[in-house]
Image (cartoon, rainbow, N blue to C red):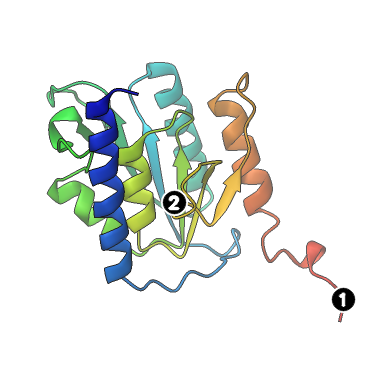
Amino acid sequence: MSIISKIRSYFFEAHLNQKLSEIKINRTSVEFEIAESIGILFDATDPSSRNKVMAYAQNLIKNGKKVNLLGFVKNKQKNLSFSFKYFTLNEISWKMIPESAEINQFMNKKFDILINLFLEKNKSLEYISALSKANLRVGPFSDNPNCFDLMIDIPDNKGIDHLIKQVDFFLNRINSPVYETAV
């Protein structure tokens, strides 16, 4: 890692820790079956992954969920036509902090569940998840313990399909009567 990258990371971590100390969010587990609002945060750069996330979102909508999506596109142009809100490199500060009205609106929405569908480490997406007001934040394993309440370990050779299946598998078991312990 270059010295510039280390400096950027230092400022990123300091900013994130300051923001986390300023907010108090009561996290709770939410039964997937009765969850009403779902946020999906994902890397929308790759068309194949983007289509898989969109298909998953459509499936959730078919099952009666209100779904909000926020994608990240790894370029500087914001002239793309998507059916979801997204942000680009132009909306990320030098400290890797994502900054826009759409990002703030997404972070401040109190989702029942925030699903993070990005496989590669992305500080900007992790920042949004860490500061999200969602009751439950689910995502792939991360070194940053502030990002997710439920982390799913995905092997390197598995793709977005596997992550989606694992998210569904674990969310369907939270507070499920089949898996509750007898008293």
| Residue denoted by label 2 | 147
Residue 9 image offset from top left, x and y in percent: 29, 38
- Image depth: mark 2 or mark 1 in front: 2
Tell me if mark 1 has few (under 14), some (14-19) or many (20+) residues whose alpha carbon lies within 10 angstroms of its own: few
Q: Amino acid at mark 2?
A: Cys
- Residue placed at 38% from the left, 42% from the top? 41
- Residue placed at 67% from the left, 49% from the top? 170
- Residue placed at 57% from the left, 66% from the top? 29
Query: At numbered mark 1, what does the secondary structure look like: helix, strand or loop?
Result: loop
Residue projecting furthest to the right:
182
| Residue 41: numbered disc | none
- Can residue 152 be seen here? yes
Q: In terms of depth relative to the viewer, which is nearer, 86 or 93?
A: 93
Query: At numbered mark 2, what does the secondary structure look like: helix, strand or loop?
Result: loop
| Residue denoted by label 1 | 182
> 117 left or right of 97?
right
- Residue placed at 37% from the left, 34% from the top? 122
Q: Quadrant of the N terminus?
A: top left
Residue 90 image offset from top left, x and y in percent: 13, 30
Tell me which label, 2 or 1, sits earlier in the chain: 2
Q: In terms of depth relative to the viewer, which is nearer, 180 or 124?
A: 124
Answer above or below: position of 115 versus 177. above
> 116 left or right of 83?
right
